[in-house]
Image: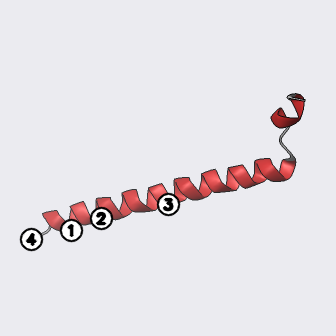
Amino acid sequence: SGSKKKKVTKAERLKLLQEEEERRLKEEVTFLKKGELTLFSYLP
């Protein structure tokens, strides 16, 4: 039964969304930190 595999429960979808959101937030934070470091390196 291949149709069973395709079906994703609401809980699973929510979990995936949360994981994706967390990953995006982490990337944004690291990006911001990098930007700050770059700014500071230009300061005298």
Q: Secondary structure at mark 4?
A: loop
* Vertical side of 1 occupied by 22: above or below: below
Q: Which mark is residue 44?
A: 4
Residue 14: percent from the left, percent from the top? 77, 52
Q: Secondary structure at mark 3?
A: helix
Label 3 close to label 1 by CB (< 8 Å): no
Kindly give the residue lying farthest to the front in the view shown: 1
Comparing marks 2 and 3, which lies closer to the viewer?
3
Kindly give the residue lying farthest to the left in the view shown: 44
Instruction: Identify the residue under disc 2.
Output: 36
Task: Name the kind of residue labelled 2 in the image.
Answer: Glu
Tag 4: Cα neighbours inside 10 Å, few (<14), some, or many (≥20)?
few
- Mark earlier in primary sequence (4, 2): 2
Q: Report how far apart the C-alphas of labels 3 and 4 lie in the structure.
A: 29 Å
Instruction: Identify the residue under disc 3.
Output: 26
- Mark earlier in primary sequence (3, 4): 3
Task: Name the kind of residue labelled 1 in the image.
Answer: Phe
Q: Report how far apart the C-alphas of labels 4 and 2 lie in the structure.
A: 14 Å
Task: Name the kind of residue labelled 3 in the image.
Answer: Lys
Q: Nearer the viewer, residue 32 or 23?
A: 23
